[in-house]
Amino acid sequence: MTHSPLPALDGEKVAAARLHAIDRFPYLASALFAAPILEADELGRLMVDEWWRIHADPVTVDQLSVPELAGELLHLTGHLLRDHAARARTVGFDEATELHHWVDAADAELVDDLPADLQALAAVHPEDLGCEDGRLAEEYYRRGLPREGMENNCGSGAHGRHAPWEPPPPSDGGEGLERDQQELVRRRVAEDVLRHANEATKGLRRWAQEAVGSQVDWRRELASELRRSISWVSGAVDYSWARPSRRAVALGPVVLPSLRRPVPEVAVVADTSASVSDELLGEAMAEVDGLLRAVGVRDVRVLACDDAVRGVSRVRQVEDITLLGGGGTDMGVGLEAALDHRPRPQVVVVLTDGWSPWPEAPLPGTRVVVGLLGSDPSPPPSWCRTVAIGDAL
Ligand SMILES: [Zn+2]
């Protein structure tokens, strides 16, 4: 088998397939562009290795349509994003007897990520292994029934066992991505998925949430988002007569207005609908309370809200409030109620899993910071500042 960057391979078709995939999944672009596509004669299919190189048999490429080829590229990229190679080593299966079963299990996991028209041609579905969908490869591997006589092999990128025909790894001057570069691409894609979470499949959203959540400290993110919002409010200059300015002293009896940094009015809308766990909400509330105190906001109005506002309290301590609710969810109602109060809040923190109607347009004069709770949240509109809290306490 020989490797060279593209010549006998129909490079234009491969490029068209990659663009087709990116057109459907713009948030996967970083991964699709990061993986070089190499010609691999006599491979009889497309495969991916652990160093993010996609190996394509030119004959196979000729036989597939552009959308079919896009499906193959997306499938192989899925193995890379989900780091099936490293996870295969953790599982530690017997290479001689269980490699194909592991690849089947990994493929079954990927099925959740892609729509039906862009599945790989030989995609293995959870039901092929006698399993329910929505699970991870490890579970399909443990619980799934091996498919007799099927020798599924997507390459070392799917199972971590390197083939003798693979070109040298990047550490030896080969093409592809080293592990730290792979991590960067994964991270970037996960962030892009969360940014486009409205369009992303449930499987990808969950993956992205975990990939980002495991690396980002939501407390730090929330703190910096709140600080930004508070300084945005404080920057709204307020000339008041609260304290005489130094110039007033120089000028004698005439009192000039001084520049005061107002303490912003902040409200918290807490989603108390049944889909949000009380424990998680309590933890997030405590964090918000601590952060607000740290920036000098001591008096916060808290609205407990599901599909209606169930309780409003002006509190000094989050522990003072009772969270009521438990029905459906409409954070729009909560926001409206928060803004109806006087003084009108300039910053509203919403703690929710996001499965709610939202106002369509930004609220004039008010910043909305959303702390997004739970492992499968629905993203709020883009005019909100959003921090993914996930379900990690
Ligand atoms: Zn596969």
Image (cartoon, grey):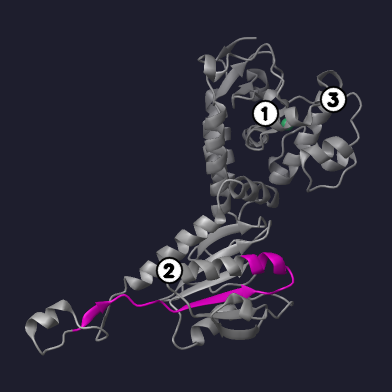
Q: Is residue 387 above or below residue 165?
A: below
Mark 1 close to ligand 1, CB under 8 Å: no
Comparing labels 1 and 2, the label whose residue is closer to the camera: 2
Q: Which mark is residue 64?
A: 1
Which secondary structure lies at badge 2? loop
Q: Nearer the viewer, mark 3 or mark 2?
A: 2
| Kind of residue sitting beneath label 3 | Glu
Q: Earlier in the sequence, mark 1 or mark 2?
A: 1
For the residues labelled 1 and 2, the Cα–Cα distance comes to 59 Å
Question: In the rendered structure, which segment of residues is drawn in magenta?
Answer: 257-283
Q: Quadrant of the N terminus?
A: top right
Label located before the other in sequence (3 or 2): 3
Q: Which residue is mark 3?
A: 98
Between residue 354 and residue 321, name the one nearer to us: 321
Between residue 161 and residue 48, name the one nearer to us. 161
Residue at 85 percent across and 47 percent down: it is 132
Between marks 3 and 2, how big is the CA–CA gap?
56 Å
- 248 relative to 293 in the view: left or right: left
Q: Is residue 98 visible?
A: yes
Pinpoint residue 73: horizontal percent, then vertical percent: 63, 32
For mark 2, what is the residue? 295
